[in-house]
Image (spheres, rainbow, N blue to C red):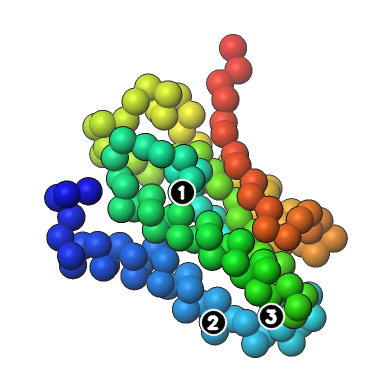
Amino acid sequence: MVEFTAKEYATLFATNFESVFHMCQLAHPLLKASRAGNVVFTSPVFGFVSLKFMSVHEATKGAINQLTRNLACEWAKDNIWSNAVSPWYIKTSLVEQTKRMDDWIVDGLNKPSVGLWAVCRLILSRYKVLRKAKICLRQYKVS
């Protein structure tokens, strides 16, 4: 965390959190008019599980998790649902470049499609589960 400059910090928060925040602001009138709106965020499980590195990045994901809960309460009166799907680490070039990963992280790397079923179920109105739901996904090796 100490190696982050103020500019890097601001860029990371703008990219990972502020973009989501402003998109919600823009989408709210349309979601409200539909009378059955649904917002599904994806935010890695490390938004609420601590890790030895990437603290600023994961703080942005924690902010999304809190926004999910707050919007569920704030927008309930407009019949807008807010949920989040939290996959384990997704195998991307950023993750693969990280040399400091513990074996338990590497063993559980997900492919990007792993959480797709959860997102689809939450988007389809007949499968809405709970307001403020947090679905955590972890891929386990089967031996």
Q: Are marks 1 and 3 in contact (CB under 8 Å)?
A: no
Q: Tell me: 75 left or right of 63.
A: right
Disc on the earlier residue, 2 or 3: 2
Q: Nearer the viewer, mark 1 or mark 3?
A: 1
Up the image or down, 66 lies above or below 99; here it is below
Image position, residue 19 (x, y; %): 42, 72
Q: Amino acid at mark 3?
A: Leu
Q: Residue at x 37, y 22 (%)?
A: 103
Q: Amino acid at mark 1?
A: Gly
Q: Which residue is mark 3?
A: 31
Q: Tell me: 88 left or right of 58.
A: right
Calculate the distance from the C-alpha at mark 2 to the C-alpha at mark 3: 10 Å
Decide: few, some or many residues near mark 2? Use Cα within 10 Å; few <14, some 14-19, many ≥20.
few
Q: Which mark is residue 113?
A: none
Q: Residue at x 48, y 70 (%)?
A: 20
Disc on the earlier residue, 1 or 2: 2
Image position, residue 121 (x, y; %): 74, 54
Q: Nearer the viewer, residue 93 or 107?
A: 107
